[in-house]
Amino acid sequence: MLNHIVIMGRLTRDPELRTTQSGVSVTSFTVAVDRDYSGQNGGQKETDFIDCVAWRSTGEFVSKYFSKGSMIVVSGRLQSQKWTDREGNKRVSWEINSDNVWFGESKKNADAGGNAPTQGGGYYAQQGQYQGGARTATHPPDVTPSPYEELDDDDGELPF
């Protein structure tokens, strides 16, 4: 069986980094994701607010490099949390347990207000791979830079 989900949206608030009693880092955050269709509400887009959790180095990465309004791409598995509230009612909530996290826009576009189209994802974190520390301007640690060059906005030399 397969349980894999990928979403892209904007953070609704700053990520909340906590540490468990055993010293494991865990970050909680919520992503606002627009639906691709307008539905039956007169053509207005609908937005879903999806709770996410990231553990260990992935959680530290999210907490350090993302903030409210940041575009984020999250890949992981959907899981349910079941509990009984104070009145004795059974409750269920759903969240994404994040395995991988990427920037959804370039730093240049994020600084400009985030409304410009993105030019690639930039850095990413994968569960167990991100080690923290200094970052270079071109790629994070343990990631091979792309062999392709980014073209200037003038694409007059392209054959199509």
Image (cartoon, rainbow, N blue to C red):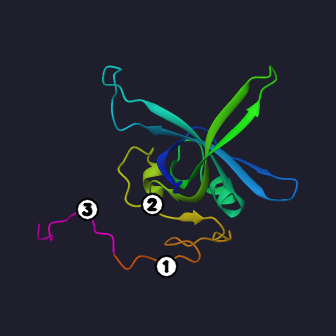
* Direction from residue 54 to residue 3 in the image, left or right: left
Identify which residue, 11 or 136, lies in the foreground: 11
Q: Is residue 152 magenta?
A: yes
User: Which of disc 3 and disc 2 is earlier in sequence?
Assistant: 2
The alpha-carbon separation of the residues under discs 3 and 1 comes to 25 Å
Q: Rate crowding at label 1 as few (under 14), some (14 to 19) or many (20 or more) other CA atoms within 10 Å.
A: few
Which residue appears at 56% of the width and 73% of the height? Answer: 136
- Label 1 secondary element: loop
Is mark 2 in CB contact (under 8 Å) with mark 3?
no
Q: Which residue is mark 2?
A: 121
Q: Rate crowding at label 2 as few (under 14), some (14 to 19) or many (20 or more) other CA atoms within 10 Å.
A: some
Which residue appears at 15% of the width and 71% of the height? Answer: 157
User: Which of disc 1 and disc 3 is earlier in sequence?
Assistant: 1
Q: Which residue is mark 3?
A: 153
* Direction from residue 94 to residue 2 in the image, left or right: left
The number of discs equals: 3
Residue 79 percent location from the top left of the image? 62, 46
Is mark 2 in CB contact (under 8 Å) with mark 1?
no
Residue 107 percent location from the top left of the image? 48, 57
Residue 56 percent location from the top left of the image? 72, 61
Part of the protein shown in magenta = 149-160
Q: Which residue is mark 1?
A: 144
Our reading of the magenta stretch's main secondary structure is loop
**Badge 3 amino acid:** Asp
